[in-house]
Amino acid sequence: MDLHGSGENTDLPALVENILQEADRAGASDIHIDPFESGVLVRFRTDGFLLVQHRLAKSLHASIISRIKILARIRTDLHHLPQDGRLTRPYHQGDIRVSIMPTYYGESAVLRILRDRPDFAQIESLGISATDAKHLATAIRRKRGMILITGPTGSGKTTTLYSLLRLITSDRLTVTIEDPVEYILPTARQIQVDAEHGVTFSAGLRSILRQDPDVIMVGEIRDTDTAHIAIHAALTGHLLFSTLHTTTALSAIIRLLDMGIAPYLISATLETIIAQRLIRKKCQRCKRPEGCRACNYTGFHGRIAVYELVTITDALREAITTAPTLSHLQTIAEHEGMQTLADDGAAKAEQGLIEKAEMLSTL
């Protein structure tokens, strides 16, 4: 099949299927299909990097988008509003999440490839140190309190979050509110955010508290209202997991203070904070800068997370009540043995798992 041709006599279903299969074989996390004035660009995001896969004729654009909409069961006659959907393929283990967005040159499509993760139940497989894994194992057995995972978009927070939730035993009821639900937890009640019908994070969380949960997961604390309800849930006998977009673990405390949460409430509820980044792994097959066929001659294959884990100690709790500066919290945490993202990255570079330069550019 000529993917770069004029578009005449092109088998569109086969073309789209070919793109999906290519992305699956490449281990891509996302497929980007973008129209421009003179053509259509198909790019795959692999190991965090967006690479051009195909340049297609502009005449193919409308038919490609229409085919994706059909597979994702979303409206084909709606072109001026964003739409979301999902599709599955027999050769792919997991769903493919579809986002359609109108742009200047026509509708673009981003397909997020969600993979079933058999390693979710293995904390160590994520790259967390044995010491930190023990701290986490203790934290998730608690009956109350808050565990936060921080980091920018694409840093692997979801994988860590689900890995921890998979370890919750079935004798404890887990209820989640997510946007979107990415992976299925076998024994949890999972709720999809639907703002159009009034199911927001804050509204959903209020309803969850009436469901007699033991463990609550809020996909993200995005606003003050959600933060206040989450703190209340953690204070009144629930173990609560959530994520925040902050650069370091201790920055989460400052972010909660900025949201108007009283220092004494943060001190009373917060138990553990994890910050993380994903860094490309050195190809373990060739271990050469010039790479090999297995790593597409890049020298890298796959990604691994570097972590910063903070257990809220008595000294940190006392400091939090004074509405401290970030540097003050950092001094206390490091004095009590906290390893920073840079420390964990340096250790993984020493083990030959990542390049130091790669680590420094990511952090």
Image (cartoon, rainbow, N blue to C red):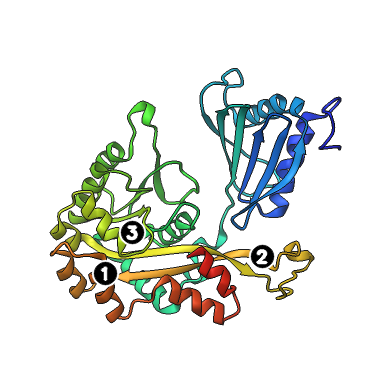
Residue at 56% x, 19% y is: 78
The reply to whether residue 141 is visible in this rendering is: yes
Q: Nearer the viewer, residue 320 or 237?
A: 320
User: Residue 4's spot in the image, x, y percent?
Assistant: 82, 37
Between residue 189 and residue 289, name the one nearer to us.
Answer: 289
- How many marks the image carries: the answer is 3
Q: Amino acid at mark 1?
A: Ser
Name the quadrant containing residue 38. top right
* Badge nearest the viewer, 2 or 3: 2
In the displayed structure image, the side of residue 54 where residue 164 appears, left or right:
left
Mark drawn on residue 148: 3
Residue under numbered circle 1: 327
What residue is rendered at 55% in x and 82% in y?
350
Looking at the image, which residue is at 77% across and 68% down? 292
Q: Secondary structure at mark 2?
A: strand
Residue to which mark 2 is pinned: 301
**Image side of residue 300 versus residue 163, left or right:** right
Residue 320, position as x, y percentages in the image: 18, 65
Quarter location, residue 35: top right
Q: Residues within 10 Å of mark 3 (few under 14, many from 20)?
A: many
Does residue 92 lie above or below 272 as drawn? above
Which residue is more in the foreground, 315 or 87? 315
